[in-house]
Amino acid sequence: MSVRQRVVVAGRVQGVFFRDTCRTEARRAGLSGSVANRPDGRVEAVFEGDEDAVGRLVAWCRRGPPGAQVDGVEVSEEAPTGEAGFHIR
């Protein structure tokens, strides 16, 4: 079953390769979507694909790559859009 979740991650998440590592992990999991830095210092990601794979990426966002310090994660459900590929915005 395909699902889509938007994740906003707070903490020390910019300048620590969060977006690049997130893209690598999402592609490895076969997910579509994107990840971007927000002007407020947070990182926002959208994951679309297999429900279990999306769950694994959301769990990964709760810890992030080495060097990140995740202080909070907001997750919201969205309707799948059929997006293809995973990109850094």
Image (cartoon, grey):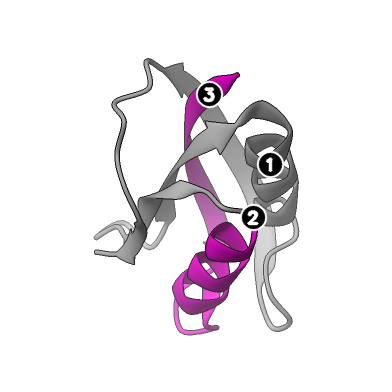
Residue beneath disc 1 = 53
Residue at 49 percent of width and 67 percent of height:
23
Question: Residue at horizontal 69%, vertical 68%?
Answer: 69
Residue 17 appears left or right of 34: right
Residue extent of the magenta highlight: 1-29
Contact (Cβ within 8 Å) of mark 2 with mark 1: yes
Q: Quadrant of residue 38?
A: bottom left
Label 3 to label 2: alpha-carbon separation: 13 Å
The residue located at (46%, 71%) in the rendering is: 19
Q: Position of residue 60 (x, y in %)?
A: 72, 55
> Magenta includes 8?
yes
Q: What residue type is disc 3 on?
A: Ser
Q: Is residue 56 magenta?
A: no
In the image, residue 30 sits, relative to residue 41, either above or below, namely above
- Does label 1 or label 3 sit earlier along the sequence? 3
The answer to whether residue 65 is left or right of residue 9 is right
Query: The N terminus is located in which quarter?
Result: top right
Between residues 9 and 84, which one lies in front from this camera angle?
Answer: 84
Q: Circle 2 is placed at which residue position?
A: 29
